[in-house]
Image (cartoon, helix red, strand yellow):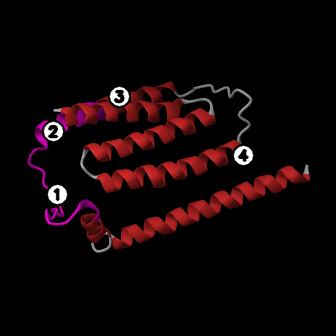
Amino acid sequence: MYELIAFYLFSAIVAALFLVTVFSKNALYAMSALAGGMVFIGGLFFVLDAEFIGVVQIVVYTGAIMALYAFGMMFFDTTQEVKEHITAKTTIYTLWIIAAVLLVLIVCAPIFGSAIEASAPIDESLNNAHSLGLLMFTKYLAAFELTAVMLLVAMMAGIILVSRRLNEGGEQ
């Protein structure tokens, strides 16, 4: 019962922080909310007894958000207020309706999804990290390597953009 309460509490906090991320006018507030959301996603993994994934979530992804935070401080002038004018109100209303339907589906999923089984059953004799390692480096090796390459390309693109921005600022 406590796990269910913690799961719904963490889920609500994550959803609220990600909404702050999307709708915030200040870039630093948005990145702070994003980092907080990543920490609470790690908390969700702890509730689900996936301690290794929870620690990796907090250390790796929240660390990546902090690097994004540093880039954001370099890119944006955080001292001025950003004025946003929302022109597509129907898009926002449509997204809210989709979010409400998804929330209802998430709440009803435990009722209707009790017969769902995992595609790769967990061996009870192995610990969490060992099971994850076997699955990640056998069945999902190509996806794991492709994700690593995509993250490397994104990091290089961020460094190139920052260096160009610094070079343009130095010439003026």
Which-is-in-front pick, marks 2 and 4? Answer: 4
Q: Where residue 45 appears, x then y in whole percent?
A: 31, 47
Which of the marked residues, 2 or 3, is nearer the chain's N terminus?
Answer: 3
**Which residue appears at 24% of the width and 49% of the height?**
49
Residue 75 is drawn in which quadrant? top right
Q: Secondary structure at mark 3?
A: helix
In the rendered view, does 3 fall on the left or right side of 136?
A: left
Disc 3: which residue: 97
Residue 13 is drawn in which quadrant? top left
In the rendered view, does 11 fall on the left or right side of 172?
A: left
Marking on residue 110: 2
Mark 1–mark 2 contact, CB under 8 Å?
Answer: no
Disc 1: which residue: 118
Q: Where residue 74 appears, x then y in whole percent?
A: 72, 46
Which of the marked residues, 1 or 2, is nearer the chain's N terminus?
Answer: 2
Q: Secondary structure at mark 1?
A: loop
Residue 32 is drawn in which quadrant? top right
Indicate yes or no whether the magenta region holds residue 123.
yes
**Which residue appears at 27% of the width and 71% of the height?**
134
Q: Secondary structure at mark 2?
A: helix
- Crowdedness of circle 1 by 10 Å Cα count: few (<14), some, many (20+)? few
Disc 4: which residue: 74
**Which residue appears at 74% of the width and 29% of the height?**
80
Residue span colored magenta: 101-129
When the figure is inspected, residue 159 is found, relative to residue 71, above or below; the finding is: below
Amino acid residing under circle 4:
Met
Q: Where residue 111 appears, x then y in whole percent?
A: 12, 36
